[in-house]
Amino acid sequence: MHHTAHRTVTVEAHRAKVRALLAPLADRVETVPLRDALGRGLAADVVAPLDLPPFANSQMDGFAVRSADLPDGGAELRVAAPVPAGAEPAPLVPGSAAPIMTGAMIPAGADAVVPIEQALPDSFPAPGAAATVRLPGTPAGNYVRDAGSDIAAGATALAAGTFLGPGQLGLLAALGLTEVPVHAAPRVLLVTTGDEVVEPGSPLEPGRIYDANGTLLEASLRQAGVAVTRTGISADNPDELAQLLHRHAPEVDLVITTGGVSKGAYEVVRQALADHDVEFGPVAMQPGGPQGLGSFEGVPVLAFPGNPVSCLVSFEMFLRPVLSGLLGAPAPRPVVRGRLAEALSSPEAKHQVRRGSLGPDGTVSLVGGAGSHLVHALARSNVLVQVPAGTAALAGGDEVEVWIL
Amino acid sequence: MHHTAHRTVTVEAHRAKVRALLAPLADRVETVPLRDALGRGLAADVVAPLDLPPFANSQMDGFAVRSADLPDGGAELRVAAPVPAGAEPAPLVPGSAAPIMTGAMIPAGADAVVPIEQALPDSFPAPGAAATVRLPGTPAGNYVRDAGSDIAAGATALAAGTFLGPGQLGLLAALGLTEVPVHAAPRVLLVTTGDEVVEPGSPLEPGRIYDANGTLLEASLRQAGVAVTRTGISADNPDELAQLLHRHAPEVDLVITTGGVSKGAYEVVRQALADHDVEFGPVAMQPGGPQGLGSFEGVPVLAFPGNPVSCLVSFEMFLRPVLSGLLGAPAPRPVVRGRLAEALSSPEAKHQVRRGSLGPDGTVSLVGGAGSHLVHALARSNVLVQVPAGTAALAGGDEVEVWIL
């Protein structure tokens, strides 16, 4: 389809289009060892194959006892053989108390643990020596971790779509699992464009700038678990760009371009994709308004604007949350509310995204102005400040939603 | 030194000891390409070798003008040749207006830009055709991004110790840099211990549990940028453990053990390290109270307790913040304040760390109880809730500090 004039769409509507475009990514599933699953999204519910804990065990170092032997006022009990770690202990003989370490299995017949600190004497006798111990009155269940009290066999341990971080992988290991079904990592072709853009390390002629977008977006994508192919910088030649896309698109799940999407006379991405099913139109967002979305020879394409801050905002507002929602990875950005340290103004018809610094007391300071070229200011920020459409001004002290980078 | 009875130390004092133990890690510096610097900590200040932007450029698509030609009321100006992208334009002849695209260099003689929307007609004439344009009164500096307005050449672009994420690497690329000095990633030997602990995937005999600590800590360490060597599970044989450490310690910067550090009779880590310079003593923290710290044949050792939640809390409270502070990586955990959804109690003499779930409205719900074995609850948490020593109870609605995982 040739590109035509498009009405401005909202941030939410554009994100929904990105989601629809990328939905097929969720179909590629693979089973990997736990070690390779760090940072991936779980592709199917995992049901607990066993109870956790697997057996009733002691929460303290102390004595395993029958609570019936220790009514109010307590009693003197004979000290039995210590409960071994990592093995099934002998049943507890009535009237006795078995030394037990934290985590060891409660012997059959015992139903409570008395911590060593509450015993008289408050130390364990030498193994094998005949001894007695004075213990206080103790209710059933005292300091016992019941089998299945963390999770019961058959219950859902982790739901499909869960991000697999250390805690989640630790749980899967505790359940005895060694591998897990995850969504395959998307493969992205990243193409930065512009006659004025040169590779870092090259000499900088007048009027030219170094390519920050390639490095910035590659890092963002890799941080999000995406496999990135870079092509280097494409000059402002629509035919060459189209040939480059034709060559590489079959190897990837998504093409991302930067630059060349404004309404100016020489917009290489618009021109290269003019005969393809790609829409170009403004999103009611500042920065990052000009956006392209569609497909090139069957491969999804997102065309981001050319300024570095616009690229980062485009990634964080559209691609990252969509991947997170579809694939369970990357983890969603933490969303918190903070209070502005200063006033701000915003174009009322647009969703403004400002860069800011969130302090531990919840205060949000703006870093740099609204300009999309302020990459040093971006580098000093730790949050994106969300100013929704419909807001023209906020005062110092007003509450805002921030996304933690 | 042989281990002796130690007084309980505070969380802050133990963290300071860990920091002192690991301080030499900051001395290992390497210079790497930007691509390999993602997630690393900057080892030296980076000074901007050029201005950003490198030259004054247009913030809008429009006309580059001399503001002196456009007093109040505006004027009709002759349209000059368009400013080329990526090259030094010809100086602006007085009385003319040069079509210019966003980001292009302001011609010598021009000092302002009029956006195309404010021009009459509000489109660019065909290149080469003689044309005039009516423009409004325009002040000097209008829609011009000055050279150096983001950062000036010679200023500190990034300070030593900065975590290098996408925004920081984007800035370094914008400055034309291709490599950067970073702290070398620490190498850690991770040894889980316990006769009762078996590898996931093996049959589970009565009284035994699967090793969650190895997977959980390896994932935590790798997420923090640490290179991990695993040895598998060490049985409760102090001589074997000491031999294993002797074999592997020379290859790493830090040894981490789990389990075997309590006051019980059979504590394999305490026994294996008895003749080494390692202190074992309680930290006033729940969970994760029993801790060992010192060195084995010159290599730093941290001995964590054996429960999975204790391991994670030990890592997050001590090792991660120390690495973050010493090496600039990993990024510090975001710290925010939330409001408890429910009451909690805490041992007043200890710093309690609870697992919780932080909602976007700032409400913190506790997930699971205080028990250090609750790994399923851990897997459903997204924050650590900090309850400092000196607090015995908090009510629903009370403010707490949380660390976002």
Image (tube, coloured by chain):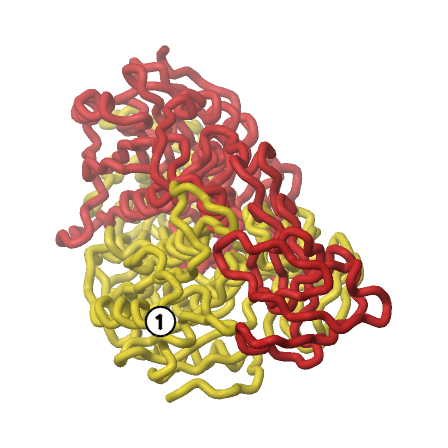
Chain colours: A yellow, B red
Where residue A25 sits in the image (x, y, percent)? 30, 74
Q: Is residue B157 left or right of residue A278?
A: right
The answer to which quarter of the image holds residue A47 is bottom left
Seen at 26% across and 40% down, the residue is A83
Q: Residue at x 40, y 62 (%)?
A: A193
The quarter of the displayed image where residue B61 is located: bottom right
Viewer-nearest residue: B217 or A135:
B217
The picture quadrant where one finds residue B189 is top left
Q: Residues within 10 Å of mark 1 (few under 14, many from 20)?
A: many
Residue that sits furthest to the left in the current view: B203
Coordinates of residue A72 in the picture (x, y in percent)? 51, 47
Q: Which residue shows up at 38% across the image and 37% down it? A: B179
Percent coordinates x, y for residue A195 in the rendering: 42, 59
Q: Which residue is the site of mark 1?
A: A238
Mark 1: secondary structure? helix
| Residue B370 in sight in this render | no
Q: Nearer the viewer, residue B158 or A57?
A: B158
Q: Chain of mark 1?
A: A
Residue at the top extreme of this rendering: B1
Q: Amino acid at mark 1?
A: Pro
The answer to whether residue B172 is above or below residue A134 is: below
Q: Position of residue B265 (x, y in %)?
A: 31, 28
Q: Nearer the viewer, residue B72 or B171?
A: B72
- Residue B158 lies, with reference to residue B54, above or below; the image says above
In screen coordinates, is A238 left or right of B330? left
Q: Is residue A181 left or right of residue B365?
A: left
Considering only vertical position in the picture, is A170 above or below B176?
below
